[in-house]
Image (spheres, helix red, strand yellow):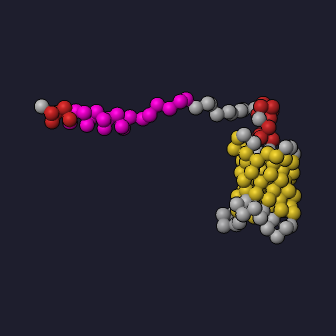
């Protein structure tokens, strides 16, 4: 008699272990179809985007809560000079007052974004200024 009971108990435990845990519902992600509304509701929207200068590009991604990642691209932006195989440096950081301050993992390359300008200081100490740009498809 005990054998069927143990089998049923073991099968029940195994079944319960395979069921997904009930998680608290997540807050819906913000999304906009109107850039003006996005600017009014989230100040990070004004920082996120592409920045360019001669032979250097940067793509800035807003992560929420004033945090950002930026990708410095040697040669320019994709489709405008940068190509796979060219250097790409990842910078991470966030808001510090009116500015966004970013740095690489070593702290040797830094960038500061204020309004529509990004000032990058490379490992060699050379400063470059990149300007926020809006590109559109030619088609």
Toward the viewer: 16 or 131?
A: 16
Residue at x 77%, y 35% (from the top left corner): 42
Q: Taking the image as drawn, is residue 47 in sight?
A: yes
Residue furthest toward the left? Answer: 1
Q: Which residues are magenta?
A: 7-25
Q: Decide whether the magenta segment is chiefly helix, strand or loop.
A: helix
Residue at x 46%, y 31% (from the top left corner): 22
Q: Quadrant of the N terminus?
A: top left
Q: Is residue 20 above or below residue 104?
A: above
Residue at x 78%, y 62% (from the top left corner): 109
Is residue 20 inside the magenta stretch? yes
Residue furthest toward the bottom? Answer: 124
Residue 61 appears at what percent x and percent y? 72, 47
Residue 12 appears at what percent x and percent y? 28, 33
Q: Is residue 92 left or right of residue 52?
A: left
Residue 70 appears at what percent x and percent y? 73, 53
Q: Is residue 2 left or right of residue 50?
A: left
Q: Is residue 138 above or below residue 5?
A: below
Residue 85 appears at what percent x and percent y? 66, 67
Residue at x 70%, y 60% (from the top left corner): 105
* Quarter of image, res 26: top right
Is residue 38 inside the magenta stretch? no
Q: Taking the image as drawn, is residue 133 in sight?
A: no
């Amino acid at each position: 008699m005990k054998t069927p009971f143990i089998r049923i108990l073991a099968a029940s435990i195994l079944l319960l272990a395979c069921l997904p845990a009930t998680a608290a519902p997540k807050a819906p992600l913000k999304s906009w179809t109107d850039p003006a509304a996005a600017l009014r509701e989230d100040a990070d929207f004004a920082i996120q985007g592409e920045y360019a200068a001669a032979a250097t590009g940067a793509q800035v991604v807003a992560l929420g809560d004033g945090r950002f990642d930026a990708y410095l691209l040697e040669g320019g932006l994709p489709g405008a000079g940068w190509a796979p195989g060219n250097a790409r440096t990842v910078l991470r950081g966030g808001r510090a007052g009116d500015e966004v301050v970013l740095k690489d993992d070593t702290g040797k390359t830094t960038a500061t974004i204020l309004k529509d300008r990004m000032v990058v200081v490379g490992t060699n100490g050379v400063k470059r200024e990149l300007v926020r740009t809006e590109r559109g498809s030619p088609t």
